[in-house]
Every structure is written in structure tokens, then in C-alpha cells.
Amino acid sequence: MENTKNLRSWLDTFGLDHPLVIAGPCSAETEEQVLKIAHQLKDTDTTVLRAGIWKPRTRPGMFEGVGAPGLKWLQKAKEETGLLTTTEVANANHVDLALQHDVDILWIGARTTVSPFIVQEIAEALKGTDKTVLVKNPVNQDLSLWLGAVERLYTANVNNLGVIHRGFSTYEKTKYRNNPEWQIPIDLQSRFPDLPLILDPSHIAGRRDLIFDLCQTALDLNYDGLMIETHFDPDNAWSDASQQITPQTLNQITADLRIRKEEDTTVNYTNALNTLRTQIDMIDTKLVEMIGNRMKTAEDIGLLKKKNNVAILQNKRWTEILGKMILQGEDNNLSEEFMLHLYKAIHLESINHQKKILGN
Ligand code: PEP
Ligand code: MN
């Protein structure tokens, strides 16, 4: 699908000199709570007030949102503070209600993006409106589902679009509630280069202390905005208590973030950058040659195994290599996570090369 529309005009109309900030509670709890947070956010960099009205909870029996009455609270917050509003919609009925209550931006949650039927239903319900819609990444690491949801909206002529990166669920526990997997949104952007990209550090982190670093990484990667869960009393929030921050902390975070320029055209900078890029290109060429050599050696081992009728996978040897390489990685400032990814990929490629030899 050729992308010819300007998907980011809604963002450009804000004319911001800093990344877009969307902030507010995970859930709208009471009218007083929504209004109090909105008033506190008015004095921050926030442009859009978020609050979940319908909450998709993984397990039943938890607080599932206040439902339609909360939309009136958002409307009132907008009237009183001038902040725009956004909430999550998960079916056509939510869309209708949100439109009736003049919600400015709708977002599609991670548990909805995984379902093409529901995304299609939402896209149909939005046809002919000029609403801005932000699509969160699906819970699982599936770029096609994310792209598919954007394409369904795009095809329904929803032309004010953006995506929210909220991290991906993993079976193995990491320090994050949802692992960032930074490469996936980068891949999405290569398909839709103009699509505004917003980070939701709250759902990635699951805890307050990781939020600043995640935001900084996003700005270093040229993200267009941040969606941060904010509550005046985070510990007593009705949902996602451990990841919400106060409006005061939000202010501190946005003040401390380093906003980088997208480009610098001065000769000094361009020359220095070119020199470094040439070095990187040379190193990359060498890296690929070395990996190619490693594979050739693996094939020699394959031949030897074939002659002696020995199985390809030698588990003990593989565990030894991995352990050794993780230590060497440490000495070279490379994280264990990276070394694991790298060596699993190298090992798999080696096995495939040996298989080719054994198959002949
Ligand atoms: C939320 O933003 O409160 C939410 C439920 O997010 P997600 O869909 O990313 O889990
Ligand atoms: Mn939440």
C-alpha cells in the first residue's frame, strides 16, 4: 500500500517546540480525581489529558473502568483547563460514545490491536470523521498485526494517525513489565515514515524508576511524543498504581530530558559524522566477513562430523561457548541480553550450515 497522505498534520497543528506530552491517570476513577489531575497537568508541558474509561483487564474481577459517565468528566476537564482529551476505545459502541462526548483523540489498546475483527469494526465506526487515532502496539511481538491495524484505519480514510509503543509481553521476565524491543517500532516507521511515534514508558516500565531513561531513549530515537500515566496519588490509584507518577514528577522529567535536534547541517558536524560513519561501515564489513569465516569453519566441522557419523548439536560445547562469550561480552561492555541474542543467531546459522553439509 503506497502511503501518500500526510498522517501527521494533526500533530503539526499543535506547533510544539517539544515532544507531545499526553498525561493523565491510567483510569478515570471519580469526577474529582479527573478534574484535580487535569488542573495539576495544566501547569506542565501536557497538551492532551488521558484517562481510561473502559479498562481492559487481563484477569476478571479487577476495576474495569467507570464506563460512559466518565466521558462527561473528560468533557468538563477540557472545558475547565483547555487540555485536549484522549481515551481508549475497544469497540464501535465506545467510538460512538466517545464521538458524542467530543473526545479529541482515540487510542486503540494493545489487547485490541491483536484483533483484526475489532480493529475493522472500529475503523468502520470512524469512517467519515476527522478524529485522530493512535494505535498501540499489539501485546505480542508481531509487526504485521500492528501494521495491519494502521492499514485498516488508513484504508477507512482515518487520516490523522499515530502509533504508541507500549512494549511487548515476554514469557521470560525482564526488568520491564513489557519489553521495549526498540527495533519493532523502527521497522514500523520504515513502512510509514511520517507516522507520529509516541512512547508509553508507563506500560513498558511497570514501575516509576525506569520512566525517565525510557523517555530519553525515545527522544534519542526521534520519537514525537510521550504518553505517561500520571496521578496525584499514584500509590492509591485504582489501576496500575506502581507505574503512575505525580504531575510534579512529570514536570521534573520533561525538564530534565535532553531534546535532540533531528539534523545539524554545519560542516564540522557533517565531517565528523561522516568519518565516524565510514568507520562503522568498515567495521560492519569486517564483521560480516568474520561471521562468514566462522560459518566456513562450522562447515569444516560438519564435514568432520559427517565422516565420523556424529550428531550436529553438541549441547555441552554450545553451553560452554555461550558462557564464555557472555563473559567476553561483559569485558567489552556488551550486555548479557545482547550476547544471548547474538550467539543464539550465530549458533542457529552455524547449525544450518552444518546441516547443509551433512545432508549432502
Ligand atoms: C492503558 O493505556 O491504560 C492501557 C490499558 O494500555 P495497554 O493497552 O498498552 O495495556
Ligand atoms: Mn494503565
Image (cartoon, rainbow, N blue to C red):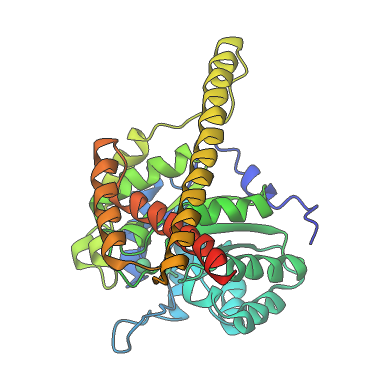
Q: Quadrant of ligand 1?
A: bottom left
**In the rendering, at what x and y percent does residue 233 appear?**
22, 60
- Say which quarter of the image contains residue 332: top left
Q: Is residue 232 left or right of residue 46?
A: left
Judging depth in this view, the residue of 78 and 223 nearest the camera is: 223
Q: Tell me which residue sits at (39%, 40%) in the image.
A: 216
Q: Nearer the viewer, residue 106 or 99?
A: 106
The correct choice, above or below, for 60 with respect to 36 in the image is: below
- Is 313 located above or below residue 252 in the figure? below
Residue 104: quarter of image? bottom right
Residue with the most extreme top position? 268
Q: Residue furthest front?
A: 307
Q: Position of residue 218 (x, y in %)?
A: 45, 44
Q: Residue furthest bottom?
A: 61
> In the picture, which quadrant includes the N terminus?
bottom right
In percent of the image, x 31 and y 50: which residue is there?
Answer: 211
**Label tally:** 0
* Residue 56 seen in this snapshot: yes
Task: In the rendered view, tell whether residue 194 sits above or below residue 94.
Answer: above
Locate residue 142, reporting x and y percent.
54, 68
User: Can the viewer see residue 17 in this picture?
Assistant: no
Question: Where in the figure is residue 155, as x and y percent of width and height?
Answer: 76, 68
Residue nearest the viewer, comparing 33 with 153 = 153
| The C terminus sits in image quarter | bottom right
